[in-house]
């Protein structure tokens, strides 16, 4: 979605593009007469960001791939080629990593196709088993029981109670329409959900790298997915940093507003229970 307030001029900013934004850019190359008013407005807004102090990257979109499931190195290389080319052609004044990505395309594609976030399988197992609990909106008298079952399933699956997939299912239980749009519990697709979920950690890593720049750099994630945009408004990446031996760390902070059916006090109490800290 388009932020309400654009960033101030002359702020060095890296914009990370979600798959749906890259798809819109690719479509615009073949059809200059976009008939959807919202998409046309979004393209116009992107063009206002096409200035030298900004940078754009399709890396997150390439990491997700275009199949809705894990892709091979060959498929990843084809995705990289088309998406880097489209972004490089669309932005003519801002910097992009299109040329660099194409230059090392096969190597990057092989590396990305082999990457899988830590605990991906545990999260997929948990999500598949837990999604049926929130397919329908849960009656108030049943919510505590369902909450306890979600936490039990997370523990059995080997996940911490403050894991983002656990928090999003709790958000779905407690009335977040944005979480429900992202999780789609009636038609659970673990790959799509975890691809959205891991945007948080991937953006955190890039922010940690950006902090090493001698010049302050902002990192922004752009998506047309209103559900994903809605939950990210209530999730904060705190203290992303590189650590010794090629590692990195960050903390995730959840806002009480992620759980609209709970009072602020009850949301804070729940977050203290499961994250060990106050929002």
Image (tube, rainbow, N blue to C red):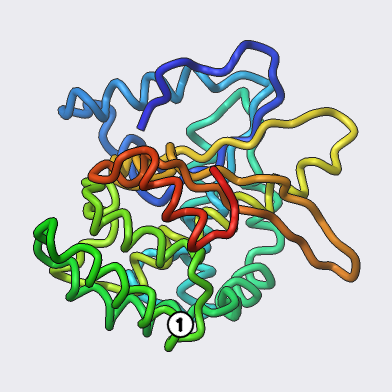
Q: Which residue is mark 1?
A: 155
Query: Residue at the location (61% across, 12% down)?
Result: 8
Horizontal side of 7 relative to 18 (left or right) equals: right
Horizontal side of 141 relative to 51 (left or right) equals: left
Task: In this rendered view, identify the residue nearer to me: 96 or 15.
Answer: 15
Furthest residue toward top: 9
Task: In this rendered view, identify the residue nearer to me: 16 or 133.
Answer: 133
Query: Residue at the location (29% across, 21% down)?
Result: 41
Evaluate whether residue 231 shows in this view. Answer: yes
Q: Is residue 110 above or below residue 57?
A: below
Evaluate whether residue 22 shows in this view. Answer: no
Q: Position of residue 109 (x, y in %)?
A: 60, 70
Q: Position of residue 55 (x, y in %)?
A: 64, 33
Q: Position of residue 94 (x, y in %)?
A: 63, 27
Quarter of the image for the C terminus: give it. top right
**SS type, badge 1:** helix
Quarter of the image for the N terminus: give it. top left
Q: Is residue 91 above or below residue 105?
A: above
Query: Residue at the location (23% across, 71% down)?
Result: 146
Q: Is residue 110 above or below residue 7?
A: below
Query: Residue at the location (27% across, 83% down)?
Result: 129
């Amino acid at each position: 979605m388009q932020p309400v307030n654009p960033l101030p001029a002359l702020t060095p900013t890296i914009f990370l593009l979600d798959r749906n934004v890259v798809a819109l850019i690719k479509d615009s190359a073949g059809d200059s007469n976009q008939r959807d008013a919202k998409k046309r407005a979004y393209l116009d807004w992107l063009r206002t960001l096409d200035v030298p102090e900004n940078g754009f990257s399709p890396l997150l979109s390439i990491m997700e791939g275009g199949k809705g499931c894990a892709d091979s190195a060959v498929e990843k290389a084809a995705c990289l080629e088309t998406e880097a080319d489209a972004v490089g052609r669309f932005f003519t004044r801002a910097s992009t990593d299109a040329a660099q990505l194409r230059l090392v395309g096969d190597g990057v594609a092989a590396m990305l196709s082999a990457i899988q976030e830590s605990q991906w399988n545990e999260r997929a197992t948990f999500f598949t088993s837990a999604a049926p609990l929130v397919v329908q909106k849960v009656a108030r008298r049943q919510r505590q029981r369902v909450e306890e079952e979600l936490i039990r399933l997370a523990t059995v699956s080997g996940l911490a109670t403050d894991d983002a997939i656990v928090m999003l299912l709790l958000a779905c239980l407690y009335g977040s329409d944005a979480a429900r749009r992202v999780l789609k519990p009636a038609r659970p697709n673990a790959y799509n959900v975890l691809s959205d979920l891991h945007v948080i950690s991937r953006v955190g890593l890039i922010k940690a790298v950006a902090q090493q720049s001698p010049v302050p750099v902002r990192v922004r994630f752009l998506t047309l997915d209103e559900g994903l945009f809605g939950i990210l408004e209530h999730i904060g990446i705190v203290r992303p940093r590189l650590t010794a031996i090629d590692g990195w760390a960050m903390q995730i902070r959840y806002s009480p507003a992620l759980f609209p059916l709970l009072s602020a006090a009850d949301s804070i109490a729940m977050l203290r229970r499961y994250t060990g800290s106050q929002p």
